[in-house]
Image: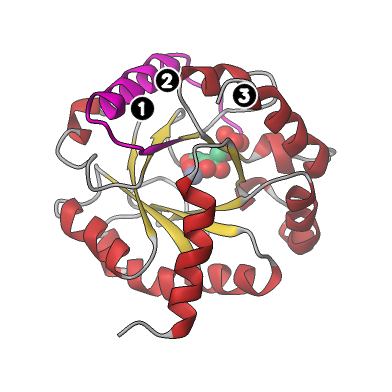
Amino acid sequence: MQDTKQVERTDERDVRMMDASLKIAPSILSANWVRLGEDVAAAERGGAELLHVDVMDGHFVPNITVGIPMVKWLKTCTNLTLDTHLMITEPGRYVEDFIKAGSSMVSIHVEADPHILRTLAHIKNLGARAGVAINPGTSLTHLEEVIEVADYVLLMSVNPGFGGQTFIPRSLERVRRLRGMIEERGLNTSIEIDGGVDTRNAAEVVRAGVNIIVAGSAVFGEKLNPEETVRAMLDAGTQWV
Ligand code: DX5
Ligand code: ZN
């Protein structure tokens, strides 16, 4: 039996994920963690609905970041939907802890989990949205067997591991093909793009078929104003969704 807290969380995520409107998911990876709460609040004022949490294990990707305690703390300081991107091997071992800590969206890499269907089902059974993430060098054909189970696809537009990298131009073509796969199957899967997106290319990715934009350095980079940047991204992309 689900406890009440879990049911509340499910309702909240349904409101935010069911419609195809453009959503910005600022990534805390590029934020100044000394003033994280203030920066997150500023991004929310700008219109962000999601908050992207990049979890790296130094094994699946060559970098180490944060884990379950960070999600727990974020949950106490923001109402944004916590969108957790697991760049870790054996993600199935940890999804339950992340969801209990407050992640309403959890994505796992197709390259990292030999039992991905089981893990995606597990995420959904625990009351969260399940995402399948894919690296720029992995063929989209790997999604064919899993796309019907996933609520969203996180398409990496840089090689995962670091913020502030340059958008790989080929990603636009991949978004278009992925949108085609989704439409062919009559699904309403969201496409989240992650890496190198800023106010200059936001409209282009949305036009290609994206409806969730992750943005780290473009929102939280030094000397930037998170509120204004999120608003500018929404303005740039909204005409295409
Ligand atoms: C990279 C992460 C991204 C990163 C994006 O591996 O998955 O979410 O924070 O950062 P920017 O937007 O700076 O490319
Ligand atoms: Zn990410």
> Looking at the picture, which amino acid does disc 3 mark?
Ala
Label 2 beta carbon within 8 A of ligand 1: no
Q: Quadrant of ligand 1?
A: top right
The residue at which mark 2 appears reads as: 171
- Extent of the magenta region: 164-191
Q: Secondary structure at mark 1?
A: loop
The residues bearing labels 2 and 3 have C-alpha atoms spaced at a distance of 13 Å
Looking at the image, which residue is at 34% across and 72% down? 96
State which mark lies toward you, 2 or 3.
3
Looking at the image, which residue is at 20% across and 42% down? 146
Q: Looking at the picture, how far across and down is residue 87, in whole percent?
A: 38, 50
The residues bearing labels 1 and 3 have C-alpha atoms spaced at a distance of 18 Å
Q: Nearer the viewer, residue 64 or 179?
A: 179
The residue at which mark 3 appears reads as: 202
Is 213 placed above or below 31 here? above
Label 1 beta carbon within 8 A of ligand 1: no
Is 190 colored magenta in this rendering? yes
**Left/right of residue 178 with respect to residue 205 in the rendered view:** left
The residue at which mark 1 appears reads as: 136
The residues bearing labels 1 and 2 have C-alpha atoms spaced at a distance of 7 Å
Q: Would you call the spot at circle 2 few (<14 residues within 10 Å), some (14-19), or many (20 or more)?
A: some
Looking at the image, which residue is at 26% across and 31% down? 186
Is 131 colored magenta in this rendering? no
Q: Looking at the picture, how far across and down is residue 168, in whole percent?
A: 47, 19
Looking at the image, which residue is at 44% across and 75% down? 7
Is 96 placed above or below 156 here? below
CB contact under 8 Å: marks 1 and 2 = yes
